Amino acid sequence: MLKLDHIGIAVKNLALAREVYSTLMNEEPYKKETVPEEKVTTLFFKAGDTKIELLESLDQDGPIRKFIEKKGEGIHHIAFEVPDIHEAVRDLKKKGFRFVDENPKKGADRKLIVFLYPKNTHGVLIELCQSLPE
Ligand code: CO
């Protein structure tokens, strides 16, 4: 069984979104992190056993900016935690899944991440993530 690690939400303005989600969830984010490789700044809120990740594009041609131009703000991806991301990629490839890029990369929140190709998963962008030791 895969554990839901977080839900990623694409936002235009992280400061405004932070206000809204802090008020809604009645708590402050526990982490803010910029990931230059992914051209994104992220804010994380705890939500029980899972998390909400707000994502703002670092520049005009980042993937989050492109997503918002096409679809508007909203849910961008859902992420499942896996114990071994390389093994998960091998296993899912054998089962016919495809990946946006099958080489895991460093993401926010001390994780290795990889994205499945959303056409295979009924239009949902699914991230697999593996926690790295501190
Ligand atoms: Co994510």
Image (spheres, rainbow, N blue to C red):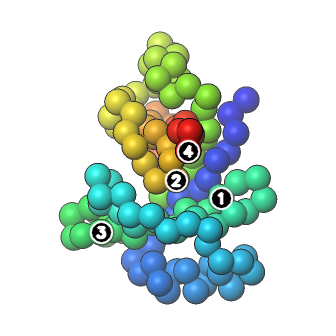
How far apart, in angstroms, are the residues tagged by discs 1 and 4? 18 Å
**Residue at horizontal 60%, vertical 32%?**
82
Q: CA distance from mark 4 to mark 3?
A: 25 Å
Answer whether labels 2 and 4 touch (C-beta < 8 Å): no
Query: Whole-percent x and y of residue 46?
Result: 69, 63
What residue is disc 2 on?
109
Indicate the secondary structure of the residue bearing disc 3.
Answer: loop
Q: Which mark is residue 58?
A: 3
**Residue 134 tag number:** 4
Q: Nearer the viewer, mark 1 or mark 4?
A: 4
How many residues crowd around disc 3 within 10 Å: few (fewer than 14), some, or many (20 or more)? some
Q: Looking at numbered disc 1 in the image, what kind of residue is underneath it? A: Lys
User: Quick one: label 4, few (<14), some, or many (20+) residues within 10 Å?
Assistant: few
Q: Position of 19 compared to 123: left or right? A: right
Identify the element where label 1 is drawn.
Answer: strand
Looking at the image, which residue is at 32% across and 54% down? 38
